[in-house]
Amino acid sequence: MRDSSRKTIFVNTRKAEQRYKVLKFNEASQAAGYCANIFERYEKRPAEHPNYDFNNMCLIEFAMLFEPHYTKPPVINEESIDTDAYAPHEQTTRRRLITLTDNTKMTIRNTPAVVRVPNFVAASDPESYYYSLLIQYMPYRNEAELLGEFNSARDAFLANEESLKQTNAYLEIYRERDRQLENAFAQVHAFQILEHAEPMELDHEEEVSYLPMNEDQFLQAKQSMNAGQKEIFTLVTQSI
């Protein structure tokens, strides 16, 4: 049962300077640099492989398919950057490995993991919101390349719309994730329309019917919202 269950991992998709790092200690209990993380391993993925298209593989797919390979049980704590659930017996049963460009190894997961990321709101923190999407879905070899010639993550996100949509369509084969990219593109295009819209003058005020709602009906309506509706609801309630 354990081999077939899906693991959940957290990937901190903030900008590099906003992420924390975990110190690594040697046998003398002295600091000896930092522990490797999923971003560094992703950048060191192989150039070629008979079973994987690594050049066009995005970070999310990489995190779903592979996990660090340890020759001995790692020290796992809640501060780990990309913590994986760890079961000692799996080291003896799962030996399918890939070799990174620095000759370290990663294990191929038996079942793709579920990846969780920080939750950003486009209206209140657009830079973090669109950067998180870029780093999740845009294939790259050097994180510094993500923004390219653009000054904002939103502009880079829009410029790479077609490429991102292709990545999203490919990831349908692993889909248990929400419609994150579709919602993001719908949202950013709606913002563009609003930014260029001219104010309208109304000749008369329209009467809006008032429908009372009790607490249970309100909670039920809130729970049925999709991701985009929840984001708009949060934005509106925060501005009141």
Image (cartoon, rainbow, N blue to C red):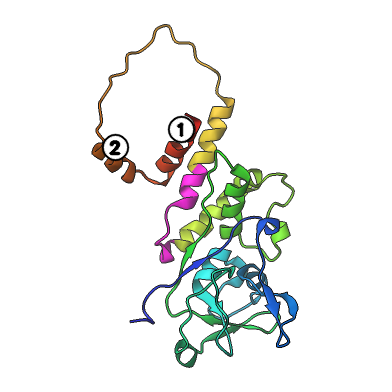
- Distance in Å between CA atoms under marks 1 and 2: 15 Å
Q: Nearer the viewer, residue 148 or 33?
A: 33
Q: In which quarter of the image is residue 228?
A: top left
Q: Can residue 58 be seen in this view?
A: no
Give the residue displayed 42% in from the left and 55% down from the top: 178
The residue under the point 52% across, 67% down is 61
Main SS class of the magenta portion in the image: helix
The x and y percentages for residue 191 are 54, 34
Q: Does the magenta stretch include residue 237?
A: no
Residue at the disc numbered 2: 218
Q: Which portion, as a residue range, is magenta?
A: 172-185
Callout 2: helix, strand or loop? Answer: helix
Q: In this view, does 17 lie to the left or right of 212?
A: right
Residue toward you, 45 or 92: 92
Q: Quadrant of the N terminus?
A: bottom left
- SS label for mark 1: helix
> Residue 112 in the image: x percent, y percent?
45, 72
**182 falls in the magenta region:** yes
Give the labeled residue for mark 1.
236
Report which quarter residue 233 is drawn in.
top left
Left or right side of 26 for 190: left
Q: Looking at this view, name the residue that lies furthest to the top.
A: 203
Q: Picture coordinates of residue 87 (x, y %)? A: 46, 83
Q: What residue type is labelled 1?
A: Val
Residue at left offset 54%, top offset 30%: 193
Q: Position of residue 223 (x, y in %)?
A: 32, 45
Viewer-closest of 230 and 24: 24
Graded by Cα atoms within 10 Å as few (under 14), some (14 to 19) or many (20 or more), the crowding at tag 1 reads few
